[in-house]
Structure formats: structure tokens, C-alpha cells
Amino acid sequence: MGILPSMRNEEGCLDRRSFLKLGSWLMAVPLIAPALAEQVAKDFYTLAPLDYPEDALEPYFDAETMRIHHGKHHAAYITNLNRGLNQDPSLAALPLDELMARLSQISDLSLQTLLRNNGGGHWNHAFFWKSLAPADDSNKPSTALSDAINTQFKSMEAFQAQFAKVAMKQFGSGWAWLIAQDGVLKITGTANQDNPLMKGLVPDAELGKPLLGLDVWEHAYYLKYQNRRLDFVKAFWNVVDWKAVSSRF
Ligand code: MN
């Protein structure tokens, strides 16, 4: 404590005035501490509840997987995204879509990777939950989307087969996507928590407007489907919210 010697009198004791000064300085510490704590722990993003109960997608997506996937995995991406944004709060001012598009411009590569994995994790999961709905035969693609699927892939069945192929080909963890590139539909795959918004990180040919995404990380299906990823992909079609997908198109 460099300030103490100058506050001491000849006997080496604090004089009354210095003692009061030090006391008022110490009194201020509890006022400063919460401000620092708030800065460290700022929650820029929080986990939104699902639009449906955890068991609403049964028997295709089981309640236990939904509970852990949303409540634990997605929550952890948000916690770590917030940790990254606290390192550079100016990035928290960007809408999340913009942050995804500008990740490649972040020069601190360890921060870039943290935000790529966890910002991507948050974006992808939030989008995924909004792409699902309880099974309902009347939930169909709009005429415009249906026409585009038929034009691009010949039929809904052919589209689903090609999407499944990309989902199966993704080695390890990642996502399969239906995207629109200047209004033209395309199926792509990304590794880890990358997504089609990540300009400069994902190849240009795989960038576009995401319409539908499927999480093919093992945590998305292992409890119910174990190693049978294809069964999970087939089950997925029963709970796709085509109304939501169509509205994005
Ligand atoms: Mn996941």
C-alpha cells in the first residue's frame, strides 16, 4: 500500500485525518465492487422458453432429449456467448445475424472462435426450435415454397432424400440446411456450430438465407436413436413447422 507511509505521523501511526481519509476510501470499495461484477457477468442474451411443451414433439423428438438439448446444451451456448461478448461489449450491440456475418472480421482469433462456436450455437438452436411444431398433417409448405422445391429438387420426396444425404454425410457434429441463394433453394451442410450466415468462415457457395436447419450433433438424437441418425432425420420431417419455413422464404 504505497499511500500508507505518507499518511503516517512521526510515530508511524496513522493520524486522525489520514485515518478518516483511508476509511472513506475503504467505504467506497463495496460501491465499486458490484459495478465491476455487473460488467463481468452481463447477460446480453438469455434462453427463451420453447413455444411448445418439451413433450409436444413426441414420439419423434422425445421429451428428455428436448429438456436437455434446450435447457442444458442451448443454455450453455448462451452462457459462453455472453462470456465472449463481455470481452468486447461493442459486439453485443450488433444484431445476432450481423454478428454471425462479421465474425471473420474479429482479429482476436480466440474471441472469434469463442463467438463462432457459441454465437453460432445460440443462433442455430434458437432457429431450430422455431422450425419445429407438433406433428400436424395440415402443416404444409406454402404454394410458393412447394413450387420452388419441385422446381429445384423435382419433388418433396427427392428434396427430403437429398437433405438426408447431406445430414448423413456430415462427419461428426454439424448441421444440414435448406437455404435460399437469391431466391434459389440449395441444401448445404456445416460443421460444428457454423451456419450459412458466417461470411468469410463458411465457403461462399454455402452462404445464404437459412430456411430450415437440422442439428445432427449426437446430443440431438442419441438418447432415443443412439447411432441411428437416419431414423432421427426421417422422424424430423414429422415435426417440421412448414408454416415457419415458408414464412422465411
Ligand atoms: Mn444441438
Image (cartoon, rainbow, N blue to C red):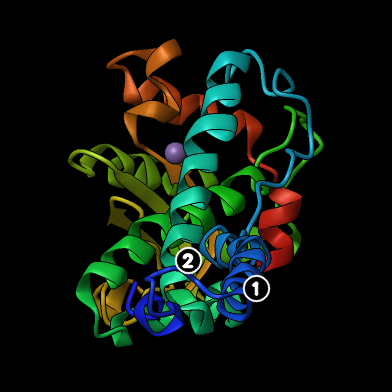
The residue positioned 64% from the left and 58% from the top of the image is 146
Residue in view at x 63 percent, y 43 percent: 129
Q: Quadrant of residue 84?
A: bottom left
> Position of 130 compared to 197: left or right?
right
The correct choice, above or below, for 198 with respect to 210 in the image is: below
Mark linked to residue 179? 2
Q: Amino acid at mark 1?
A: Leu
The quadrant the C terminus occupies is bottom right
Disc 1 crowd, CA 10 A, few/some/many (<14, 14-19, 20+): few
The residue positioned 41% from the left and 55% from the top of the image is 118
In the rendered image, which residue does mark 1 sit on? 20
Provide residue 33's location: percent of width, then percent of height: 59, 62
Sequence order check, earlier mark of 2 and 1: 1
If the image is split into quadrants, where does the N terminus sit? Answer: bottom left
Q: Viewer-proximal residue, 217 or 90?
A: 90
Q: What amino acid is at disc 2? A: Ile
Residue 43 pos. (x, y %): 62, 59
